[in-house]
Image (spheres, rainbow, N blue to C red):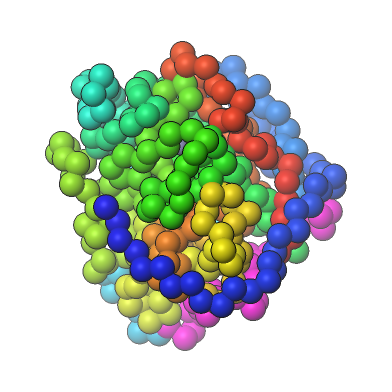
Amino acid sequence: MLRVVFILGLFLACLSCTNTNDENHNHDGHEHLVKISTTDSGITFTPVSTSTPVSTSTPVSTSTPVSTSTPVATPTPVSTPQVSEDSGLFLTGADSRIPAETLAVRPDIWLCLNDVYVSDLTPSGSNNLRCNVSVNVLEDTVIISATGIPNHDFESTNGCCATEQDELWYLPRFPLDAINQLYEYAPSRGATAFTVTGVAIYGPEDGPGGDAVAHELGLYEEDRQPIDLGICGGHSGPGGQYHYHFDANCMHWHADISSTNYMFEDVDSSVHSPIIGFAFDGYAIYGSYGWDTNFDVREMKSSYQLVDGATGYGGISDYVYVAGLGDLDQCNGHIAPTPHSVEPVYHYHSTMRNGADAHGFPYFPLCYHAIPDSRNIGHIGGTGGGAIGPSDRPANPGNRRRRF
Ligand SMILES: [Zn+2]
Ligand SMILES: [Zn+2]
């Protein structure tokens, strides 16, 4: 089990809880997406209702999320001298990317491009499930097809059992940053992102509406519906869709070895974590260990904490963003160099702890720094055969925005 020390520090008033039902859907800023003609698989392109809220379209803003927030958020290449691309810190080669292109176009990012067979260790789970990913780079979109099965043995737990899915994930090939810090919420339930093995990453809330991770850590009793997370922070849900609620670094650990001994402490804390997935806006999600401005590895901490008296039972609304509490911004990302980029670039981290060393809500991206491809919103895998219960549907399929 994971151990965290819960230090509940200052509880600030809710700085950022204004939910705006933004009617300002301006599709003009989305031209590059609309142009796409999907020759793949007959999937209908639905022009994104999540398009840029502001009409000043230009992708100018390689925007800094919040000038007031994390100290790490504004590293300058100038202040990080003596580190060149030849230093060995950066991954080079095979990178023929166009500047500003999503890292998803790099073939070395993906796992399961060749089949990997794994087991669902939950009794009655299958011992012969296939992890497979294929990537199709189009003019403006990267489309990922996947079976939705991880590359490591896992546990479906109460949602048993996981089945191979026909996942189709869409990424903007060129992430277009949201303007005026008007970041769209990731769905609070259901898929918000996916891994480099093609597996769904879910938002913090599970079916009953509580924070699934806070429950796993014993912060509250779930009296609405049994919830249990298996090894690697994942389990199966509606339609047999396996998904993660935290960490997900398991995919870079004993991928071929059957074991239930995985713990977050097993993640290599001496090097910058590899990419574990992508948010629907095209930006990469790295594991929990990143670089500070001196390129020293440190655990990236989130900047959310429970409001006074809350336990996570109420889900996302139990938390408040506290600028500067941790390393990361409201969306759980920051602008910093990565092993893939000498220049500081926006990216997310998975988080296990916040800046006060309590649990690391929201664990994965909570909102999108750039405009997400809404074809992923409300996405639940299709071939599992199970019914999708109303309580399992994403609560906010696409239109809610939060002005930070
Ligand atoms: Zn779940
Ligand atoms: Zn980072």
Horizontally, is 288 left or right of 119 in the view?
right
In which image quadrant can residue 269 be found?
Answer: bottom left
Identity of the residue drawn at 56% across and 59% down:
310
Res 96 visible: no
What secondary structure is the stretch in magenta mostly built from?
loop
- The boundaries of the magenta stretch are 54-80
Horizontally, is 135 left or right of 16 in the view?
left
What residue occupies the far top of the structure in this picture? 385
Query: Residue 157: x, y in percent?
Result: 33, 31
Q: Observer-nearest residue: 179 or 175?
A: 179
Q: Is residue 61 magenta?
A: yes
Identity of the residue drawn at 34% across and 64% down:
4
Identity of the residue drawn at 47% across and 42% down:
222
* Whether residue 391 is situated above or below residue 219 in the rendered picture: above
Q: Observer-nearest residue: 236 or 65?
A: 236
* Whether residue 359 is situated above or below residue 67 in the rendered picture: above
Identity of the residue drawn at 53% across and 28% down:
380
**Image quadrant containing the C terminus:** bottom right
Q: Observer-nearest residue: 11 or 376?
A: 11
**So how many labels did they put on this image?**
0
Query: Residue 188: x, y in percent?
Result: 59, 44
Query: Residue 46: x, y in percent?
Result: 70, 28
Q: Is residue 22 magenta?
A: no
